[in-house]
Image (cartoon, grey):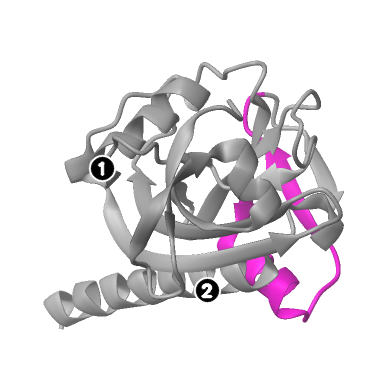
Amino acid sequence: MDSEIVRIFDQNMKCIGKKTRGEVHISGDWHETFHCWFTIVEKNECYVLFQKRAEVKKDYPGLLDITSAGHLLAEEDVREGTREVEEELGVSIEFEDLISLGIIKGEIKLDQIWDREICHVFLYECRLLPEFKLQEDEVDSLYKIRLDDVMNLFEGTVTEITATEISKQNSKIVNKASFVGLDSYYVNVFDRIKKRLNKAKGSVQQVKD
């Protein structure tokens, strides 16, 4: 996978060339990714789905992460990012069913990786949870966390929250260290999801009135 070719960009998101995935994670070039967040409403509560990255992954093994995400290859456009969902989760979705949450930049710099992403972020609102078939070398399991809880965690008002594994309904306590370190990105995404929920609730209330 490190040999896959991706487009690289300057600070203004202008394409300036191409490199391999392995190279951009060393040199810190901006590159494009596709992020798809799944949510579901149960008993009037919104839950966000997180994947637990496989323990065999090179980067961030065993940590909770975006429901499904991946790099956009040099020859791909954003619409083709849905292939990541099918590959990782075994679920086929239509691009037209996704809700755009916009473009968000994210950056992580560690000793062995400098990851700077131009993230095309989308939301998939589940009416019912689909039948997932996880890609074993990518995803160990899926967890659901109440939106308000995970917002509180990354806004710093709590230090621990509960995550529930959806296949076994097992719950565990998690903290910030349980997630890939994209704190400001998470705050941004969850805020956008919350605003969408509030807008939808307001529209329903207007209809009732």
* 180 displayed left or right of 32: right
Camera-nearest residue between 165 and 81: 81
Q: Which amino acid does label 1 sit on?
A: Asp
> Is residue 100 located in the magenta-colored stretch of the structure?
no
- Decide: is 86 above or below 6: above
Mark whose residue sits in front, 2 or 1: 1
Amino acid found under the numbered disc labelled 2? Asn
Q: Please tell me whether mark 1 sits on a helix, a strand or a loop.
A: loop
What is the spatial separation of the Cα atoms under label 2 and label 1, in whole angstroms?
24 Å
Q: Position of residue 101 (x, y in %)?
A: 35, 64
| Span highlighted in magenta in the image | 145-167
Q: In this view, does 122 lie to the left or right of 144?
A: left
Q: Where is 20 relative to 36, above or below?
A: above
Q: Is residue 69 visible?
A: no
- Read off the residue under disc 2: 188
Q: Can residue 166 be seen by looking at this rendering?
A: yes
Q: What element carries label 2?
A: helix
Is 53 displayed left or right of 132 in the figure? right
Residue 8 at x, y percent in the picture: 44, 53
> For mark 1, what is the residue?
77
